[in-house]
Image (cartoon, rainbow, N blue to C red):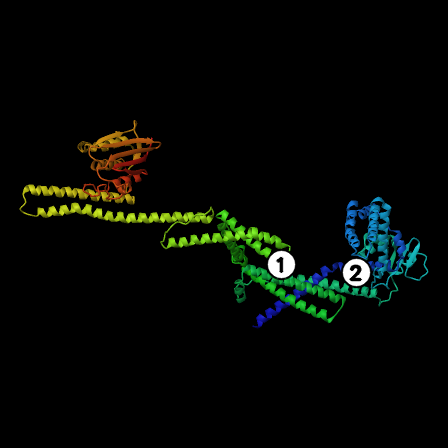
């Protein structure tokens, strides 16, 4: 504990020595001009007193001023004449102005409302008008008026006693002077002399200097605020004085000047001793502190606490203590200055307090810089600490706020028209509020505010109310749609953003209705799908089970057994084909089927598919009309899958076409597309539900008496979709039409 306190005392004493040495050095450097002169008479202080004494002489001792002599110096220039002449405008303007001023007085006098006679007022007016006309016709007339004004100003100057108050100086009784002007001698000694050289020689004086007192300089400096021409006239009357001013040898030691001179010489010796010793002590202090200083190797309690402070606050704290240290040094410097002029208990006390306060600030500055340097041993340490500073955090917060505000503004102007309208509305509202308060400042704003409120404020208010009402309707409609109540569409008014919103909401409303209809239809088709799948799978399976049970009987003949087996085989094949078609549709729907695309002639592929049904076509009694292109029509397709499409379509035509009717197949090229059209007349009623024929297990034969699986068109459409083509079905009464479009290649 003793070692710790001893170190603290040593540190405080080192800080005290530093402050004293630094203060003394500052005082020495700042006052070098003051105490660097060899004698008091060369100092700035004495020269100021000398100039003050010269001003005292010219205002109180040298020469005389009279009112008449100054008036004789008055001159009037052409510029002054013109300025006086046109001071109130041109001749016509001045005449009209005077007539206008007297017009009302004359009228009142004629009505008997004034005690004056109209003739007297008219005579007064005409006199002024004549004077104005003379101003523009005679320079001498104007010059006389200007001279009279200036003479009045001279009289006012001499009547003001403050203009002749003597300017005193503390050395009035200590100077001797000798001045001459136009052969007249001015001096403050009664000695019999023949010349100024005899009186003010260097052998008789401590100090003597040639001096010229310029009258215009002193009048301008000390007799403001009169006009420049008056100052110049006073200076011309007074004139300049050439002579000497000196300080005699036999001056009493207790005089003011000798007291200041003696004090200066004593302070000068003390000043040089203080300055040199302060600089030496300061140099020794730096040498000692460099040897003693060391950065802390281990983290102590104070260092740990200091490290928790953000780096910018550490730097700011060091800056504050440094500023307080400099302020304390200036305080010390001021106390030293005061003590050199007058030794007093107050200034001595302030000196001690300022020294101790500065020492404390120097210690705080030292420890802060020491800990700061110990923490920031490298540039990377400083950069890492700076990322956690208060300034960086504040900048990040400001950046976030700016981004948020910028995002809000951008969102407000996503629709430029709406953003501009909102800002115009806000400007009108704030303008009305500001104008309302302006009425209380000046009633003249009332009329302007009234028109603004009627023609802008009221229409804006009506528009705002209508817009809010329209917005409420849209909001209520949105809530109804969210709860499932679609209802009637909203009325669309105008071309505003709310109108577009209402129109879009109507579109959504219609879309929801269509979606609900599609959903209902999908549920219905799903039910039919399950029913159809169950029916189509159960029918052959039931036959297989039934005839299998019959085969178990022992009393069957060979012909019956053979017939039963044939039925079981046929039903099994149908069940197999149905299941294979079902799996194929499922694979196509999930996209798990691979296409082996090749360059295939669609005309040739169609002919092959028709050839497979040659015998069936002859038995069906259908008349096929096939129209192909003259040249091959190539497409990049999977030939096997595309043959399956043609096979399914031709098979459906054979099964479901009306007997003895015509079937049309047309192949053509439209730009880069190949269009293949199949048309036939159905033997079953189609009921205008062509889009449902795409559905799985959907047949034109609603009784489901045919042997088809109901998957033919679904498989065909899936294959065409995989080839990025299109398959469309059209029905017109019993006319059934299929259009296939595929992209052709060269």
Badge 2 or badge 1: first in the primary sequence = 2
Q: Is residue 483 left or right of residue 309?
A: left
Q: Quarter-wise, where is residue 669 in the image? A: top left
Of 745 and 297, which appears nearest the observer?
Answer: 745
Determine the secondary structure under disc 2: helix
For marks 2 and 1, give the CA distance.
Answer: 60 Å
Residue to which mark 2 is pinned: 45
What crowding class fits label 2: few (fewer than 14 Cα within 10 Å), some (14-19), or many (20 or more)? few
Of 55 and 150, which appears nearest the observer?
Answer: 150
Query: Which quarter of the figure is the C terminus placed in?
Result: top left
Outermost residue toward the top in this view? 630
Query: Which quarter of the figure is the N terminus placed in?
Result: bottom right
What crowding class fits label 1: few (fewer than 14 Cα within 10 Å), some (14-19), or many (20 or more)? few
Q: Position of residue 672 (x, y in %)?
A: 35, 32
* Marking on residue 440: 1
Q: Which of marks 2 and 1 is in front?
A: 1
Q: In this view, does 617 lie above or below 522?
A: above
Q: Position of residue 178 (x, y in %)?
A: 90, 58
Number of callouts = 2
Q: Is residue 478 left or right of residue 86?
A: left
Determine the secondary structure under disc 1: helix
């Amino acid at each position: 504990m003793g070692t710790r306190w001893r170190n603290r005392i040593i540190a405080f004493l080192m800080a005290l020595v530093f402050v004293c040495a630094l203060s003394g050095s500052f005082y020495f450097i700042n006052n070098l001009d003051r105490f660097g002169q060899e004698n008091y008479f060369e100092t700035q202080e004495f020269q100021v007193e000398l100039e003050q004494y010269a001003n005292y002489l010219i205002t109180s001792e040298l020469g005389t001023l009279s009112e008449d002599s100054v008036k004789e110096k008055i001159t009037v220039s052409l510029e002054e004449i013109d300025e006086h002449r046109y001071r109130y405008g041109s001749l016509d303007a001045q005449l009209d102005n005077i007539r206008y001023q007297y017009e009302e007085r004359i009228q009142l006098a004629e009505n008997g409302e004034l005690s004056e006679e109209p003739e007297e007022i008219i005579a007064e007016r005409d006199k002024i008008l004549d004077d104005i006309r003379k101003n523009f016709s005679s320079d001498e007339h104007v010059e006389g008026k200007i001279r009279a004004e200036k003479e009045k100003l001279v009289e006012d100057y001499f009547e003001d006693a403050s203009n002749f108050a003597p300017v005193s100086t503390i050395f009035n009784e200590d100077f001797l002077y000798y001045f001459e002007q136009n052969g007249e001698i001015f001096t403050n000694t009664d000695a019999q002399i023949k010349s100024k050289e005899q009186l003010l020689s260097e052998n008789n004086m401590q100090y003597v200097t040639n001096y010229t007192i310029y009258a215009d300089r002193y009048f301008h400096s000390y007799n403001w605020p009169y006009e420049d021409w008056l100052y110049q006239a006073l200076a011309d009357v007074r004139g300049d004085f050439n002579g000497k001013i000196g300080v005699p040898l036999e001056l009493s030691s207790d005089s003011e000047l000798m007291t200041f001179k003696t004090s200066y010489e004593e302070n000068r010796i003390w000043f040089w001793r203080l300055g040199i010793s302060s600089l030496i002590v300061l140099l020794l202090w730096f040498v000692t502190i460099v040897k003693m200083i060391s950065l802390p190797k281990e983290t102590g309690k104070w260092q740990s606490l200091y490290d928790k402070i953000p780096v910018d606050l550490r730097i700011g704290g060091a800056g504050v203590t440094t500023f307080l240290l400099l302020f304390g040094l200036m305080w010390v410097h001021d106390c030293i200055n005061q003590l050199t002029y007058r030794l007093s208990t107050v200034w001595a006390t302030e000196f001690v307090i300022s020294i101790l306060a500065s020492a404390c600030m120097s210690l705080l500055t030292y420890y802060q810089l020491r800990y700061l340097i110990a923490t920031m041993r490298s540039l990377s340490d400083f950069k890492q600490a700076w990322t956690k500073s208060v300034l960086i955090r504040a900048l990040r917060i400001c950046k976030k706020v700016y981004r948020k505000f910028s995002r809000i503004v951008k969102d407000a102007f996503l629709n430029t028209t709406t953003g501009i309208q909102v800002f115009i509305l806000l400007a009108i509202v704030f303008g009305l509020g500001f104008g309302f308060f302006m009425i209380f400042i000046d009633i003249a704003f009332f009329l302007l505010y009234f028109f603004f409120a009627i023609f802008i404020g009221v229409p804006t208010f009506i528009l705002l109310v209508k817009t809010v009402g329209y917005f409420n309707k849209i909001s209520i409609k949105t809530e109804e749609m969210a709860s499932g109540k679609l209802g009637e569409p909203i009325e669309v008014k105008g071309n505003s953003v709310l109108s577009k919103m209402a129109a879009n909401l109507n579109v959504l409303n219609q879309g929801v209705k269509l979606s609900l209809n599609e959903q209902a239809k999908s549920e219905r088709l799903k039910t039919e799908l399950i029913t159809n799948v169950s029916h189509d799978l159960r029918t052959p399976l039931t036959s297989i089970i039934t005839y299998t049970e019959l085969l178990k009987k022992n009393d069957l003949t060979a012909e019956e057994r053979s017939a039963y087996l044939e039925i079981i085989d046929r039903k099994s094949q149908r069940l197999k084909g149905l299941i294979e078609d079902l799996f194929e549709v499922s694979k196509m729907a999930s996209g798990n089927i691979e296409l082996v695309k090749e360059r295939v002639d669609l005309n040739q592929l169609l002919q092959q598919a028709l050839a497979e049904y040659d015998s069936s076509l002859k038995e069906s009694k259908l008349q096929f009309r096939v129209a192909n292109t003259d040249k091959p029509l190539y497409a990049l397709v999977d030939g096997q899958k595309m043959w399956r499409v043609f096979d399914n379509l031709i098979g459906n035509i054979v099964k479901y076409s009306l007997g003895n009717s015509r079937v049309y197949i047309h192949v053509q090229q439209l730009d880069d597309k190949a269009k293949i059209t199949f048309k036939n007349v159905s033997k079953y009623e189609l009921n205008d539900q062509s889009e449902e024929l795409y559905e799985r297990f959907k047949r034109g034969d609603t009784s489901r008496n045919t042997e088809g699986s109901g998957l033919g068109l679904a498989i065909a459409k899936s294959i065409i979709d995989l080839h990025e083509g299109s398959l469309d079905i059209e029905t017109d009464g019993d006319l059934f039409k299929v259009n296939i479009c595929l992209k052709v290649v060269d």
